[in-house]
Image (cartoon, rainbow, N blue to C red):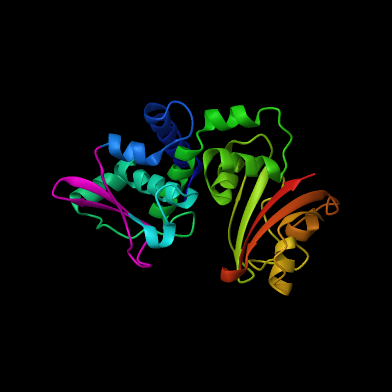
Amino acid sequence: MLTPHRNTGFAELAEFISDDFCPKGMITPCDIVEASGIGFSCGDYGNAFDGLLEHQYGKFHIYINANRLQHAYTPRARFTIAHELGHYFIDEHRNALKSGKAPSHPSFTNFQSSNIVEREADYFAASLLLPATRVKADVNRRKFNFNLLDELSKKYQTSLMSTAIRFADIGNHPIMVIFSKNGIIEWKWSSKDFPYYHLKNGNRVPETTVAGDFFATKSAFTGTDQIIADDWFQVWDNRYLQKFYEHCIPYAPLNCALSIVWED
Protein backbone atom coordinates (compact mmCIF):
# COMPACT_ATOMS: atom_id res chain seq x y z
CA MET A 1 0.00 0.00 0.00
CA LEU A 2 1.01 3.62 -0.34
CA THR A 3 2.84 4.85 2.75
CA PRO A 4 3.22 8.43 4.00
CA HIS A 5 7.01 8.19 3.55
CA ARG A 6 6.77 7.10 -0.09
CA ASN A 7 4.00 9.61 -0.76
CA THR A 8 6.24 12.40 0.50
CA GLY A 9 9.05 11.22 -1.75
CA PHE A 10 6.81 11.07 -4.83
CA ALA A 11 5.36 14.52 -4.07
CA GLU A 12 8.80 16.08 -3.63
CA LEU A 13 10.06 14.50 -6.86
CA ALA A 14 6.96 15.65 -8.76
CA GLU A 15 7.20 19.21 -7.45
CA PHE A 16 10.88 19.40 -8.39
CA ILE A 17 9.99 18.34 -11.94
CA SER A 18 7.07 20.80 -12.08
CA ASP A 19 9.29 23.66 -11.01
CA ASP A 20 12.09 22.62 -13.33
CA PHE A 21 10.03 22.25 -16.52
CA CYS A 22 7.05 24.56 -15.79
CA PRO A 23 8.18 27.13 -13.21
CA LYS A 24 5.19 29.41 -13.81
CA GLY A 25 1.55 28.94 -14.68
CA MET A 26 -0.23 25.67 -15.35
CA ILE A 27 1.78 22.45 -15.60
CA THR A 28 1.88 21.19 -19.20
CA PRO A 29 2.71 17.45 -19.24
CA CYS A 30 3.17 17.38 -23.03
CA ASP A 31 5.98 19.93 -22.71
CA ILE A 32 7.66 17.77 -20.05
CA VAL A 33 7.40 14.73 -22.35
CA GLU A 34 8.99 16.62 -25.24
CA ALA A 35 11.74 18.19 -23.11
CA SER A 36 12.59 14.78 -21.64
CA GLY A 37 13.09 13.26 -25.08
CA ILE A 38 10.24 10.78 -24.67
CA GLY A 39 8.31 9.74 -27.78
CA PHE A 40 4.60 10.50 -27.82
CA SER A 41 1.56 9.19 -29.71
CA CYS A 42 -2.12 9.97 -29.28
CA GLY A 43 -4.32 7.51 -31.20
CA ASP A 44 -7.39 5.30 -31.08
CA TYR A 45 -6.57 2.12 -29.18
CA GLY A 46 -10.12 1.00 -28.45
CA ASN A 47 -10.60 0.29 -24.75
CA ALA A 48 -7.17 -1.28 -24.30
CA PHE A 49 -5.81 1.41 -21.95
CA ASP A 50 -5.83 5.06 -20.97
CA GLY A 51 -2.07 5.36 -21.34
CA LEU A 52 1.01 3.21 -21.75
CA LEU A 53 4.76 3.76 -21.34
CA GLU A 54 6.87 1.53 -23.55
CA HIS A 55 10.63 0.98 -23.68
CA GLN A 56 12.04 -0.35 -26.94
CA TYR A 57 15.40 -0.04 -28.67
CA GLY A 58 16.79 2.10 -25.85
CA LYS A 59 14.00 4.72 -25.98
CA PHE A 60 10.81 5.44 -24.05
CA HIS A 61 7.49 6.19 -25.72
CA ILE A 62 4.13 7.26 -24.26
CA TYR A 63 0.87 6.21 -25.91
CA ILE A 64 -2.36 8.06 -25.05
CA ASN A 65 -5.73 6.59 -26.01
CA ALA A 66 -7.81 9.24 -27.79
CA ASN A 67 -10.75 6.82 -27.84
CA ARG A 68 -11.06 7.12 -24.05
CA LEU A 69 -9.46 10.53 -23.43
CA GLN A 70 -10.50 12.59 -26.51
CA HIS A 71 -7.34 14.67 -26.98
CA ALA A 72 -4.14 15.37 -25.08
CA TYR A 73 -5.37 18.51 -23.30
CA THR A 74 -8.49 17.33 -21.45
CA PRO A 75 -8.06 17.09 -17.64
CA ARG A 76 -8.23 13.30 -17.82
CA ALA A 77 -5.66 13.13 -20.63
CA ARG A 78 -3.35 15.55 -18.79
CA PHE A 79 -3.56 13.29 -15.73
CA THR A 80 -2.88 10.20 -17.84
CA ILE A 81 0.22 11.76 -19.39
CA ALA A 82 1.39 12.81 -15.92
CA HIS A 83 0.75 9.24 -14.73
CA GLU A 84 2.97 7.83 -17.49
CA LEU A 85 5.60 10.42 -16.59
CA GLY A 86 5.40 8.98 -13.08
CA HIS A 87 6.40 5.58 -14.45
CA TYR A 88 9.29 7.31 -16.22
CA PHE A 89 10.57 9.52 -13.38
CA ILE A 90 10.10 7.08 -10.48
CA ASP A 91 13.40 5.19 -10.53
CA GLU A 92 12.01 1.74 -9.66
CA HIS A 93 9.35 1.96 -12.38
CA ARG A 94 11.71 3.23 -15.09
CA ASN A 95 14.49 0.76 -14.26
CA ALA A 96 12.08 -2.19 -14.23
CA LEU A 97 10.87 -1.27 -17.73
CA LYS A 98 14.35 -0.56 -19.00
CA SER A 99 15.78 -3.85 -17.71
CA GLY A 100 12.84 -5.89 -18.98
CA LYS A 101 11.91 -7.07 -15.47
CA ALA A 102 8.50 -5.44 -15.92
CA PRO A 103 6.86 -5.47 -19.36
CA SER A 104 4.97 -2.49 -20.71
CA HIS A 105 1.46 -2.66 -19.33
CA PRO A 106 -1.78 -0.78 -19.96
CA SER A 107 -2.67 1.88 -17.41
CA PHE A 108 -6.19 2.86 -16.37
CA THR A 109 -5.57 6.06 -14.47
CA ASN A 110 -7.22 8.47 -12.02
CA PHE A 111 -7.10 6.14 -9.00
CA GLN A 112 -9.06 3.35 -10.69
CA SER A 113 -6.49 0.61 -10.11
CA SER A 114 -5.67 -1.26 -6.89
CA ASN A 115 -2.19 -2.14 -8.22
CA ILE A 116 0.44 -0.46 -6.04
CA VAL A 117 2.62 0.57 -9.02
CA GLU A 118 -0.38 2.21 -10.67
CA ARG A 119 -1.40 3.95 -7.45
CA GLU A 120 2.14 5.32 -7.07
CA ALA A 121 2.03 6.73 -10.60
CA ASP A 122 -1.42 8.22 -9.89
CA TYR A 123 -0.12 9.92 -6.76
CA PHE A 124 2.88 11.25 -8.66
CA ALA A 125 0.53 12.60 -11.35
CA ALA A 126 -1.66 14.46 -8.85
CA SER A 127 1.44 15.92 -7.20
CA LEU A 128 2.93 16.95 -10.55
CA LEU A 129 -0.21 18.75 -11.73
CA LEU A 130 -1.01 20.29 -8.33
CA PRO A 131 2.35 21.37 -6.84
CA ALA A 132 2.11 21.89 -3.09
CA THR A 133 3.71 25.34 -2.98
CA ARG A 134 1.34 26.78 -5.60
CA VAL A 135 -1.80 25.14 -4.21
CA LYS A 136 -1.02 26.20 -0.65
CA ALA A 137 -0.64 29.79 -1.83
CA ASP A 138 -4.02 29.58 -3.58
CA VAL A 139 -5.88 28.31 -0.50
CA ASN A 140 -4.08 30.33 2.17
CA ARG A 141 -6.63 31.83 4.58
CA ARG A 142 -9.51 30.67 2.39
CA LYS A 143 -12.56 29.14 4.07
CA PHE A 144 -13.14 25.64 2.78
CA ASN A 145 -16.19 24.58 0.82
CA PHE A 146 -16.68 22.57 -2.36
CA ASN A 147 -16.38 25.70 -4.51
CA LEU A 148 -12.72 25.95 -3.47
CA LEU A 149 -12.03 22.47 -4.88
CA ASP A 150 -13.95 23.34 -8.03
CA GLU A 151 -11.88 26.51 -8.44
CA LEU A 152 -8.59 24.61 -8.05
CA SER A 153 -9.77 21.93 -10.48
CA LYS A 154 -10.49 24.53 -13.15
CA LYS A 155 -7.31 26.52 -12.55
CA TYR A 156 -5.00 23.48 -12.76
CA GLN A 157 -7.16 21.60 -15.30
CA THR A 158 -7.36 18.51 -13.11
CA SER A 159 -10.23 16.17 -12.28
CA LEU A 160 -12.20 16.83 -9.11
CA MET A 161 -11.10 13.43 -7.83
CA SER A 162 -7.37 14.11 -8.11
CA THR A 163 -7.87 17.68 -6.86
CA ALA A 164 -9.73 16.47 -3.78
CA ILE A 165 -7.11 13.81 -3.01
CA ARG A 166 -4.31 16.34 -3.35
CA PHE A 167 -6.19 18.86 -1.19
CA ALA A 168 -6.65 16.20 1.50
CA ASP A 169 -2.85 15.97 1.76
CA ILE A 170 -1.83 19.63 1.48
CA GLY A 171 -4.96 21.77 1.89
CA ASN A 172 -5.90 24.11 4.71
CA HIS A 173 -8.88 22.12 6.03
CA PRO A 174 -9.23 18.39 6.83
CA ILE A 175 -11.44 16.43 4.41
CA MET A 176 -12.19 12.82 3.54
CA VAL A 177 -12.67 11.62 -0.04
CA ILE A 178 -14.77 8.46 -0.54
CA PHE A 179 -15.25 6.66 -3.84
CA SER A 180 -18.09 4.15 -4.13
CA LYS A 181 -19.46 1.92 -6.86
CA ASN A 182 -22.66 -0.12 -6.86
CA GLY A 183 -23.20 0.91 -3.26
CA ILE A 184 -19.80 -0.47 -2.16
CA ILE A 185 -16.97 1.72 -0.86
CA GLU A 186 -13.99 1.13 -3.15
CA TRP A 187 -11.53 3.37 -1.30
CA LYS A 188 -11.21 6.41 0.95
CA TRP A 189 -8.53 9.07 1.37
CA SER A 190 -8.37 11.55 4.23
CA SER A 191 -6.28 14.34 5.68
CA LYS A 192 -3.99 13.36 8.55
CA ASP A 193 -5.99 15.50 10.97
CA PHE A 194 -9.45 14.41 9.83
CA PRO A 195 -11.34 13.57 13.05
CA TYR A 196 -12.50 10.08 12.01
CA TYR A 197 -10.96 7.16 10.17
CA HIS A 198 -13.36 4.20 10.48
CA LEU A 199 -16.48 4.19 8.33
CA LYS A 200 -19.64 2.59 9.66
CA ASN A 201 -21.54 -0.22 7.96
CA GLY A 202 -18.45 -2.11 6.77
CA ASN A 203 -17.71 -1.48 3.10
CA ARG A 204 -21.31 -0.64 2.20
CA VAL A 205 -22.36 2.98 1.70
CA PRO A 206 -24.67 3.95 4.60
CA GLU A 207 -28.18 4.75 3.42
CA THR A 208 -28.28 7.94 5.49
CA THR A 209 -25.50 9.59 3.45
CA VAL A 210 -25.93 11.63 0.27
CA ALA A 211 -24.12 8.90 -1.66
CA GLY A 212 -26.39 6.31 -0.04
CA ASP A 213 -29.44 8.20 -1.23
CA PHE A 214 -28.07 8.18 -4.77
CA PHE A 215 -27.54 4.42 -4.77
CA ALA A 216 -30.97 3.82 -3.23
CA THR A 217 -32.98 6.12 -5.50
CA LYS A 218 -30.69 6.61 -8.55
CA SER A 219 -31.49 10.31 -8.17
CA ALA A 220 -28.41 12.07 -9.55
CA PHE A 221 -28.36 14.96 -7.06
CA THR A 222 -25.05 16.80 -7.25
CA GLY A 223 -24.54 19.23 -4.43
CA THR A 224 -23.64 19.83 -0.81
CA ASP A 225 -25.85 18.65 2.02
CA GLN A 226 -25.47 18.74 5.78
CA ILE A 227 -25.02 15.42 7.58
CA ILE A 228 -23.92 14.32 11.05
CA ALA A 229 -20.88 12.28 12.07
CA ASP A 230 -22.97 9.17 12.70
CA ASP A 231 -24.13 9.10 9.06
CA TRP A 232 -20.69 8.06 7.76
CA PHE A 233 -18.43 7.24 10.71
CA GLN A 234 -18.08 4.90 13.65
CA VAL A 235 -18.46 7.27 16.59
CA TRP A 236 -17.59 5.94 20.03
CA ASP A 237 -18.48 8.98 22.14
CA ASN A 238 -21.24 11.58 22.36
CA ARG A 239 -20.11 13.44 19.23
CA TYR A 240 -22.37 11.42 16.93
CA LEU A 241 -24.46 14.55 16.24
CA GLN A 242 -21.39 16.56 15.21
CA LYS A 243 -22.21 18.47 11.99
CA PHE A 244 -20.45 17.65 8.72
CA TYR A 245 -21.02 18.44 5.06
CA GLU A 246 -21.03 15.96 2.19
CA HIS A 247 -20.70 16.97 -1.43
CA CYS A 248 -21.58 14.01 -3.63
CA ILE A 249 -20.75 13.79 -7.34
CA PRO A 250 -22.68 10.82 -8.79
CA TYR A 251 -22.04 9.27 -12.18
CA ALA A 252 -25.18 7.33 -13.03
CA PRO A 253 -23.90 5.49 -16.18
CA LEU A 254 -21.29 3.64 -14.08
CA ASN A 255 -23.37 3.67 -10.86
CA CYS A 256 -20.55 5.28 -8.92
CA ALA A 257 -20.19 8.33 -6.69
CA LEU A 258 -17.43 10.51 -5.30
CA SER A 259 -18.12 12.04 -1.88
CA ILE A 260 -16.11 14.83 -0.25
CA VAL A 261 -16.85 15.09 3.48
CA TRP A 262 -15.72 17.80 5.88
CA GLU A 263 -16.54 19.09 9.32
CA ASP A 264 -18.81 22.11 9.72
Relative depth, front residue between 161 and 35: 35
Q: Which residues are magenta?
A: 37-63
Is residue 49 covered in magenta? yes
Query: At 38% from the left edge and 67% from the top edge, which residue is drawn?
Result: 47
**68 w.r.t. 53: above or below:** below
Pick the front one: 15 or 254:
254
Q: Is residue 53 above or below residue 142?
A: below
Q: Left or right: where does residue 102 sit relative to residue 145?
A: left
Above or below 219: residue 168: above
Q: Image check: 224 left or right of 77?
A: right
Q: Quadrant of the C terminus?
A: top right
Q: Is residue 67 visible?
A: yes
**Image side of residue 125 versus residue 100, left or right:** right
**Which of 60/233 is in front?**
60
Q: Left or right: where does residue 232 sit relative to residue 109?
A: right
On the image, the x and y values in percent for residue 215 come to: 68, 70
Instruction: Give the total number of marks visible in the rendering.
Output: 0
Inspect the magenta stretch and tell me whether residue 133 lies in it. Answer: no
- In percent of width and height, residue 241 lies at 86, 53
Q: Position of residue 232 (x, y in %)?
A: 73, 58
Q: Residue furthest left?
A: 57
Closer to the camera in the image, 127 or 239: 127
Q: Give the residue drawn at x 78%, y 60%.
A: 231
* Relative image position of residue 182 (x, y in whole percent): 61, 71
Q: Is residue 206 visible?
A: no
User: Picture quarter containing residue 187?
Assistant: bottom right
